[in-house]
Amino acid sequence: MKVIFVIFFFFVVVLLSQNVYAAPNIPSWVKETAKWWVEGKITEKEFLNAIEYLVEKGYIVLDGQKNNENIVLSTTSTTKLLEAAVQNLKEEDNEVALLYFNEALKREPDNVKALVDKGIAMARTGDLDGAKYIFDQAIRVGEMKKSLDYRAVINAGIAISIYGNQTDAVPYFDRVITNADKVDANTLYAAYVNKGITYYEQGRYADAIGQYDKALEINPGRLGAIVNKANALQEMELYDEALKYFEKAYTITSDPLRWKPTFVLVE
């Protein structure tokens, strides 16, 4: 009972003090919950449930570690950390997702899926150099385990194409294409679209269209291949044909900002 009290008291102090990192849009009931427990208005179990929710959602992390790194509570299991990381990744709370991935990977540095997902979160935050490093690490670990996650290969190619150059990125996409029997349709589609973009960036528009057509054979209704092909046709001054694909894109989204050449990230 004393242990429980100490843990609860610690959380109350954290919640009511100023030395706390609070995620944006933190629920208004957080401090009230701590206050109610102190006043005896709610049970220990109810308070513990509230704390568990806040930790899993990333609302509570202690501030003060050097280099502005946040400390994830060490009592959280690795499974819970990864569940919280993936959930925050889905919700595009990338900074919070990275917090959980970093802690989980301290415990399981060879977790390929966690490495790939961390790379995605890093790419979203603009850290393309760091994302490439993580994707390459996931590839190395996957090869050693003979369980390569081809999402890492695709996303590494994207990071290299953006941060480095298109020529170095192509072998990553080719590696997926040559292993078509080992990947799902979504990953193969992404490989063709992204390889097409590397050709597009080099001014090889006809070659790019060839890749987009292969992607459209897999999924004729996806925006990525449609708009990328439309842009390549436009660069070749094939305006009537380009217009047909832009019109297809319009049936999917009326936002013209999404009609620009875009890489397809595999999540």
Image (cartoon, rainbow, N blue to C red):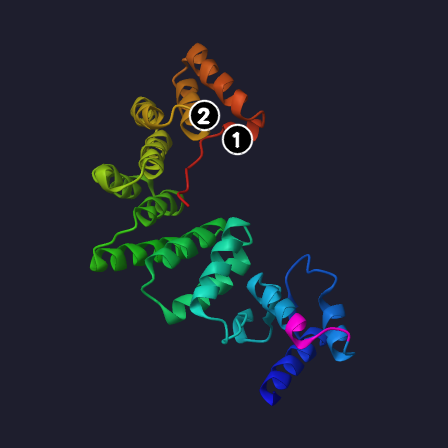
Tags 2 and 1 touching, CB below 8 Å? yes
Q: Amino acid at mark 1?
A: Arg
Q: Residues within 10 Å of mark 2 (few under 14, many from 20)?
A: many
What residue appears at the point 46 percent right and 70 percent down from the top-left corner?
77
Start-end of magenta stretch: 41-47
Q: Which residue is mark 2?
A: 227
Which of the pair 124/166 is nearer the observer?
Answer: 124
The percent position of residue 254, horizontal first and vertical second, equals: 58, 24
What residue appears at the point 51 percent right and 60 percent down from the top-left corner?
84
User: Label 2 to label 1, Cα distance in Å?
Assistant: 8 Å
The percent position of residue 213, horizontal first and vertical second, equals: 33, 23
Q: Which residue is mark 1?
A: 258
| Secondary structure state at the residue bearing disc 2 | helix
The number of numbered discs placed on residues in the rendered structure image is: 2
In the figure, 75 relative to 80: above or below?
Answer: below
Q: Is residue 44 magenta?
A: yes
In the figure, 84 relative to 154: above or below?
Answer: below
Q: Amino acid at mark 2?
A: Val
The percent position of residue 118, horizontal first and vertical second, equals: 42, 57
* Image quadrant containing the N terminus: bottom right
